[in-house]
Every structure is written in structure tokens, then in C-alpha cells.
Amino acid sequence: MIRQDKKGLLKPLEETNLDCLKGVFKRLIFDSPTFCVYRFIDEAEGSISVVGDIHIDDFGPTYLLYGTFEDHKRFGIQFKILHYETALPDDLEGIIAYLSGPLFKGIGPKKARKIVETLGGDSLDILKKDPQILSDLGFKKKDIDVIGQVLSNNLDYEDSFYKLLAIGLKASDIKRLLNKYEGNTLNILANEPFAPYFDLPNFSFNNAYKIASYYKLAHDDDRYLLALMAHLLDDLSFKTGDSIISYQSIQNAFLKSEHDLEHFERALDLALEKGVVFLYHAYYMHFRQFWAERLISKYLLNFAKRSYVDDDLLDRCIREIEQSIGLKYSAEQKAAIERFYHENFSL
């Protein structure tokens, strides 16, 4: 078996005899609840069919596939996947993102990029051994001390950063996670993989699902079902433009996602119990939609009263505007203008 170290190099491990492919998924050939067949482009083998009990949604990253080659009677040589993971990026952006992260106070992207462009892919190893090399690059003692201290005292943070990169998260999302959960990030994600979906605005369900997949969270787990139900309502609200969603629409979306309704009622009951979904006159609302509408309604109820407007003055102003632009408002348009000046709120 071969695995990848932090620099993107493949290192042999002798404890297993699994083969490894490194490359990208090209397209889905066959899909079933128990296994899928994909066309995979391996860096060494080229195009090959890969088979396994995996469901890949994101074809963008480079993946490491561990398994065995098999000669199928009908379909020829295939690669049976027993385990897979996202490969660490072999570019320098990950290192730049790490050095410009919250631990390295005062460094920032500009200084981090200068370091990486000068020292290359071995930047971190070089700096761990001799951070004073930065003095030759014009760095101040304060910056050198920060980098040296962080690299020597925060190996757990570095491991967390690179592990999350390997899961498939972007550097910007990783920095948000580490800012939020600090040194306890991996422990929190291991226990609650979907916590960022609820805790961090605009942290996508798909990114949280990558974390859940890494920790092998089952689709019948309450944590998955709770997040899935929230995601489905959020997605339906976005697509339809409606705050309230019908039971049938939610059920259809759940069926499309999970291919059956075995856990649908439990998921919906759990979402209602945990306050992730709210019931409103036989319709359902995503919790953010619910609280946003409560906030809006409260704001409108307490909207500042308009001062008195003289109707005769308003009428003269309307006539002057009609003359200046060369058109005449209809009775309905005039009434709308008058309501705007007399009512607290109007649509």
C-alpha cells in the first residue's frame, strides 16, 4: 500500500498489499444503492474502470484509491475500491494558506507568499529547522519569532490543517473551522461532522458531508438525517423562492437524495424536535427562514410612525411630477404613492 505524506509524495507501506491509484474521476458509468462504476483517469495507468461502494459527487479533487485489480469476465480489467481519500494538493497554495492563517499573527498572505515563492514546497521543513533564514528575506525579528514558535509548538494545528485539506476542504473553509473550534477542531468534527453546517454561515452541506464521509458517518445516523433535512428545506426554499415548503415537496427531495423513504419520517420528526425545521400551518420552514421572518415581522411591527403628510401638498407634488415627465398616473398609481406617505410599510 502506498500513502501520501504532507508534501504530496507517495511512500510505500509494507503492512498491506493493496494497490493505489492516484487521479481524477471522469464520469459515472453505473449507479446503484450498493455500488457504483466510474471512469477514472490514473496518473500512471491512464483511463480505467473503478468499482466500489462509494458515491462521489465532487469530481474536482485528485483522489487516492486503494484496492485491487480484478479481471471481470464481461467488462475486463477493473479496479475494486476498498478505501479512498482526497489527495493532498501538490501545489503551494495550501502552504501559503497555512502560513497566513490565524496562528501566524502579523504574517498574512503577502508575506506567506514571499516565503513560499522563495523556499518552495519544503518551506515548512526548512523553517522548522532554521526560522532565522527569514532574516535573509528581509523579515523582522517579530515575524521570525512568531513563525518559529508556532511551527515548534503547534504541530497539532498543522496536522489538523493538512488533514482537512486531505478531506477535500478549501484552505479558506479550513481557516474558518480552526478559527471557530481552535485546537479542538478535529475532536468536534469527529463527533459532530455537520456542526460547521449549523455553526458557520455559508458553510455548505456538501463540505460538511465530506467531513462526515471521512469519519464514515452512516446515512441512518441521526446526525446525518438532521443535517440532510435542514439542507433539503434550505435548497427547496432557494429553488422555489418560498419560505414555506409542503410535506410532499420535502418527501420528494428526500427520496431523490436517499433513493428510499425508510428514514424520512424519523428525519422529519428529529428536525422538528431539534428546532432545525418549524411547522407553520401544515407547511414546513427551514430554521433560518423561520427566524428571519420572525425578525422581519418584529421590525415591521415596531416600524417608526410616519409624520403627518398634507394631502393637498402631496396632490400638488404629484401633478408637478406628472407635468415634468409628461405622463399621468392612474388612480391605482396615485393611491400607491399616497399609501407610501401615510403607511408605515408598503409593498
Image: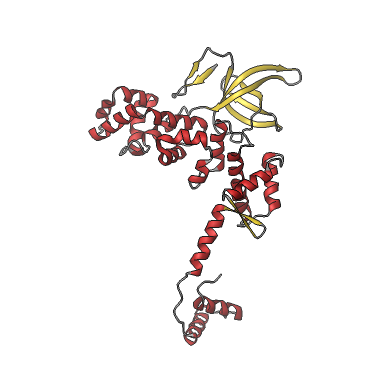
Question: Which corner quadrant holds the C terminus?
Answer: bottom right
Q: Quadrant of the N terminus?
A: top right
What residue sits 51% from the left and 35% below the top?
Answer: 191
Vertical side of 234 occupied by 6: above or below: above
Q: Is residue 10 above or below residue 115?
A: above
Q: Is residue 140 left or right of residue 113?
A: left
The answer to whether residue 95 of the structure is visible from this angle is: yes
Q: Residue at x 56, y 42 (%)?
A: 205
From the viewer's perspective, is 234 left or right of 91? right
Residue 140 shows up from this direction = no
| Image position of 309 (left or right of 242) | left
* Spot occupied by residue 250 in the image (x, y as percentages of width and height): 67, 49
Name the foreground residue: 117 vs 93.
93
Residue occupying the far top of the picture: 14
Which image quadrant is residue 177 in? top left
The answer to which of 214 and 195 lies nearer the viewer is 195
Q: Quadrant of residue 183?
A: top left
Return the x and y of residue 68 as percentages of the image width and height: 63, 17
Q: Position of residue 113 (x, y in %)?
A: 36, 34
Q: Nearer the viewer, residue 118 or 277?
A: 277
**Image point (52%, 31%), residue name:** 167
Q: Is residue 287 above or below residue 333?
A: above
